[in-house]
Image: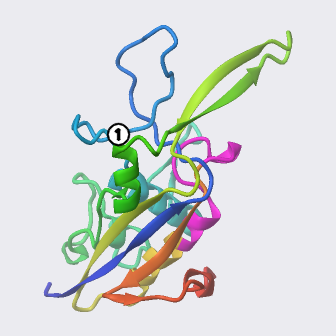
Amino acid sequence: MKLKKIRQIEGKISILTGLHIGASNETIEIGGMDNPIIKDPLPESNAPYIPGSSLKGKLRSLIEMKEGRYVKEARGLGNPCNCGRRDCPVCPVFGVSASAQHPPDLGPTRIIVRDAKLSKEWEDRYRNGDLPLEVKYENAINRITGMANPRPLERVPAGVTFDFRISFKVFDNDPDEYFQTVLKAMKMLELDALGGAGSRGCGQIRFTPIIIDGERQPDSFLEAIQLG
């Protein structure tokens, strides 16, 4: 296989409703946060970010659901597609596991999704203490007793933006549909949610602006993408 070019999709992810991408809480403190968000481990930063794995995983899962490409287990669980076929809308773009049996012409994973860091303006505000993270309090109600069980959820507040970048390898004989798959997934993500608690209002985002191979796209670019 011959690599023809590497395409770039970059821009900003605008948070429309509070974003929660959880991190592990290794210590238990009285009055501490039960559901913190993931942050840069470097003490001089400690800023929230969107892991590339979270973004790529959500893009992949949405395409798998749309195309019916997830693998259903006996217990009713859906696993990622791992067929390794070139005509699959998922595997050539997002990759397969090392144990998958696939034809040698499948080639490497086409997409590389970078971690999305806070945009420069918001990073400066965070370091200066002008970007406080919000805590959303929710209640789980016991259906029998009616007792409420409060659960605080840390979120990046609406209005914050992150810089994202996606690299996409194009090999000879690759169909144009591979690249279109990524754009479709981005559109579907705008209609869905990123991170946790999406069904409870968290994680609505918008990709704006979108720059493809150095050219800025119209604000209505994803709206024109056909999902059918």
Q: Which of the 4 image quarters holds residue 168?
A: bottom left
In the structure shown, which secondary structural element does the residue marked by tag 1 occupy? Answer: loop
**Which residue is nearer to you in this view: 209 or 79?**
209
Q: Residues within 10 Å of mark 1 (few under 14, many from 20)?
A: some
- Give the extent of the magenta segment: 187-202
Identify the residue shown where x is 50% and y is 39%.
Answer: 133
Inspect the magenta stretch and tell me whether residue 118 lies in it.
no
Q: Is residue 33 above or below residue 62?
A: above
Q: Position of residue 107 (x, y in %)?
A: 21, 74
Q: How many marks overall?
A: 1
**Which residue is nearer to you in this view: 173 or 39?**
39
Can residue 48 be seen from the camera position used here?
Answer: no
Say what amino acid the circle numbered 1 marks. Lys
Q: Position of residue 97 (x, y in %)?
A: 28, 54
Identify the residue shown where x is 37% and y is 85%.
Answer: 212
Identify the residue shown where x is 48% and y is 56%.
Answer: 58
Inspect the magenta stretch and tell me whether residue 198 lies in it.
yes
Is 121 on the left-hand or right-hand side of 225? left
Q: Which quadrant, please, contains the C terminus?
A: bottom right
Can residue 96 be seen from the camera position used here?
Answer: yes
Q: Is residue 79 above or below residue 226?
A: above
Identify the residue shown where x is 24% and y is 51%.
Answer: 99
Colour scheme employed for the rendering of this structure? rainbow
Is 29 on the left-hand or right-hand side of 115? right
Which residue position holds label 1? 39
**Which residue is nearer to you in this view: 16 or 60?**
16
Q: Is residue 35 above or below residue 68?
A: above
Q: Position of residue 23 (x, y in %)?
A: 40, 33
Q: Position of residue 197 (x, y in %)?
A: 61, 41
Q: Which quadrant, please, contains the N terminus?
A: bottom left
